Image (cartoon, rainbow, N blue to C red):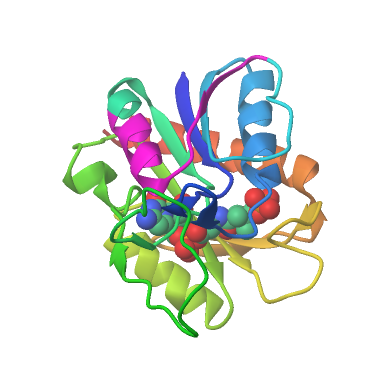
Amino acid sequence: MNILVTAGPTREPIDPVRFIGNRSSGKMGYEIASAFAREGHTVLLVSGPTSLDVPDGVDFLPIESANEMNEAVANHLGRMQVAVFAAAVADYTPSTVAKEKIKKSADAIMLELVRTTDILGSCRSEHGFAGTLVGFAAETENLIAHAREKLTRKQCDLIIANDVSKPGIGFESDQNEVTLVYPERIEQLPLASKHDLAHQLVRAILMLHAEKCAAN
Ligand code: PMT
């Protein structure tokens, strides 16, 4: 099968040397891409900047901004059976990018931010994607309620919810602890290395895909 995985952070440029970013290391998404490839699938990994090596057997498409990630997904989604969105995409980007480095002068400056495209949220509505659609939810409160809201609003088959306020899991760490939020049920997975967890997630996603195909 053809599988799309997004991973890592996006960088939203302010001027030629500065950007708005986030703490995603890319580890979770890269492990998922690698686990799908080891299962024999054709994987396209669309990734923001990370310090990780590209996993063996994975096609790699590097991007920087949310806008570039959106274009990459739009260009490739049509041939995918499964899409997994592990990237931490900026929800806002500067409305203008300064051509030259912004010089220090005033005591305070204002930065106007505008919404980026919800890439996961546009898969069904904009691109008519009919495959298995899996998102993540990075939450600091009301984990399951917020994940359920994202499952419905973004028309996903599964949301993988992680509580990013807990030390030792989520952003940057080598471990994660997630809850799988399906339309009809939830399943909590125990704390595990991102490597081991990725295998569990891939098994769950492939089972979900098989059930979806059987039902159609
Ligand atoms: O990279 P690591 O350091 O290993 O950390 C892993 C992780 C914490 C980044 C990962 O497990 C995770 O939770 N990724 C999603 C982070 C996030 O941005 O969550 P969100 O709740 O803001 O977004 C919900 C979903 O919509 C995500 O699938 C996200 O990829 C997607 N999204 C969000 C905004 C946007 N403009 N476009 C999107 O596609």
Whether 139 is drawn above or below 34: the answer is below
Q: Residue at x 37, y 54 (%)?
A: 98
Answer with the quarter of the image where residue 55 lies: top right
* Towards the viewer: 15 or 27: 15
Whether 78 is drawn above or below 159: the answer is above
Q: Residue at x 28, y 32 (%)?
A: 74
Inspect the magenta stretch and tell me whether residue 58 lies in it: yes
* Towards the viewer: 23 or 93: 93
Residue 155: x %, y % from top left: 29, 54
* Towards the viewer: 72 or 191: 72
159 lies left or right of 26 = left
Q: Residue at x 42, y 37 (%)?
A: 211
Q: Residue at x 67, y 27 (%)?
A: 34
Highlighted range, magenta: 57-74
Q: How many marks?
A: 0
152 lies left or right of 203 = left
Q: Is residue 157 visible?
A: no
186 lies left or right of 190 = left
* Towards the viewer: 194 or 216: 194
Inspect the magenta stretch and tell me whether residue 193 lies in it: no
